[in-house]
Structure formats: structure tokens, C-alpha cells
Image (cartoon, helix red, strand yellow):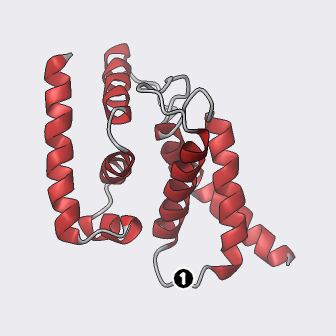
């Protein structure tokens, strides 16, 4: 049991940024970043003994994190249009202009539907279409089509601003 706990803690530390990024996209006034993060880690812990290593661990983590956040949000039934951007996702010192561009991007992403948010988040994490398909349960063709439409939506939103 102790070995399992050490392995789990090590995994969570290694993928902490990934988990935070997924949670960040789904943050709302009623579903804070820390609440979502704790819920994801709890669900990862519950599922950890059943992880059969049939897919990459990052794919497994993304799948659980996305499903947990979406379920948490559905329970809240309060999805505002804009996420509050108090947490710096990459914790990297960037120029004010870059930070503002990132804030604007996250505001636009937050206006997308839940599946669209998931797909674009995975895309921004440099996941291949195959990995995105595996995580979301879509076909690779469907991922490509949806990504194209999402990018177009974001372009239109950007022009409106």
C-alpha cells in the first residue's frame, strides 16, 4: 500500500501543471480552482488501483480530469460566461502584453461549449489528434473537424473584440 501511495504522489507531482490547467479552464465562482483540483486528485486516487497502463498515463489523467471537471460543473448548474483569471497557469513571468493576450484567449475559450473547451485545451497542450480522440472518445476525423470549427469560432470572437 505504501508503495502505491508513493507512486501516486509522484504521479500527481509530475502532472500537477496538467491537472491545474484542466481545472483552470473549468473554474467558476462556485467551482474554484482548488475545489476542482482536489476533486480531480480524489478521483485519480480512486481510479489509480484500476489503471491498467493500456494508454499513456497523461491520457488517463486528462480523461479523468476533464470528466471530473465537467461533472462538477454540471452539479453546480451555474456556468458563467467568463472565468476569473486569478491563477497564472504557467507561473512564468511574461510581458504585460503577453499576459493580456493569454487572458483574452482564456476568456474566449471559456465562452465555448464543454467539449470544445476540452478539445482546444488538449490541442494547446500539443496533444496529437490521435491522443485527443482517445481522451475525448471522438474519432480522429471528428477531432480534426471540431478543431477547425473551434479555431474559426475563436477567430470570429477575436474580431468582435
Q: Using the image as rendered, state which of residue 105 and residue 43 is in the foreground.
A: 43
In the image, is 107 to the left or to the right of 49?
left
Percent position of residue 40, x then y: 63, 54
Q: Using the image as rendered, state which of residue 101 and residue 145 is in the foreground.
A: 145
User: Residue at point 54% right, 33% down?
Assistant: 78
User: Which quarter of the picture shows residue 129?
Assistant: bottom left
Q: Using the image as rendered, state which of residue 54 and residue 7 is in the foreground.
A: 54
Q: How many marks?
A: 1
Mark 1, other Cα within 10 Å: few <14 / some 14–19 / many ≥20: few
Q: In the image, is residue 58 above or below residue 37?
A: below
User: Residue at point 28% right, 71% down?
Assistant: 130
- Outermost residue to the right: 2
Q: In the image, is residue 137 above or below residue 24?
A: below
In the image, is 129 to the left or to the right of 91?
left
User: Residue at point 49% right, 63% down?
Assistant: 63
Quarter of the figure with the N terminus = bottom right
**Secondary structure under the numbered disc 1 in the rendered image:** loop
Quarter of the figure with the C terminus = top left
Percent position of residue 128, x then y: 27, 64
In the image, is 142 to the left or to the right of 138?
left
User: Residue at point 51% right, 50% down?
Assistant: 70
Percent position of residue 97, x then y: 31, 16
In the image, is 141 to the left or to the right of 83?
left
Residue of label 1: 53
Q: In the image, is residue 63 above or below residue 98?
A: below
Q: In the image, is residue 48 above or below residue 97?
A: below
Amino acid at each position: 500500500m505504501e508503495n502505491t501511495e508513493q507512486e501516486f504522489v509522484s504521479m500527481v507531482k509530475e502532472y500537477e501543471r496538467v491537472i491545474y490547467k484542466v481545472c483552470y479552464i473549468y473554474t467558476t465562482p462556485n467551482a474554484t480552482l482548488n475545489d476542482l483540483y482536489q476533486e480531480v486528485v480524489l478521483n485519480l486516487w480512486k481510479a489509480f488501483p484500476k489503471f491498467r497502463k493500456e494508454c499513456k498515463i497523461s491520457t488517463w489523467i486528462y480523461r479523468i480530469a476533464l470528466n471530473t471537471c465537467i461533472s462538477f460543473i454540471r452539479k453546480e448548474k451555474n456556468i458563467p460566461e467568463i472565468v476569473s483569471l486569478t491563477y497564472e497557469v504557467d507561473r512564468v513571468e511574461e510581458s504585460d502584453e503577453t499576459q493580456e493576450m493569454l487572458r483574452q484567449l482564456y476568456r474566449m475559450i471559456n465562452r465555448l461549449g464543454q467539449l470544445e473547451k476540452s478539445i482546444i485545451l488538449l490541442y494547446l497542450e500539443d496533444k496529437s489528434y490521435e491522443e485527443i480522440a482517445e481522451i475525448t472518445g471522438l474519432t480522429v476525423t471528428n477531432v480534426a473537424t471540431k478543431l477547425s470549427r473551434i479555431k474559426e469560432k475563436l477567430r470570429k470572437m477575436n474580431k468582435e473584440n
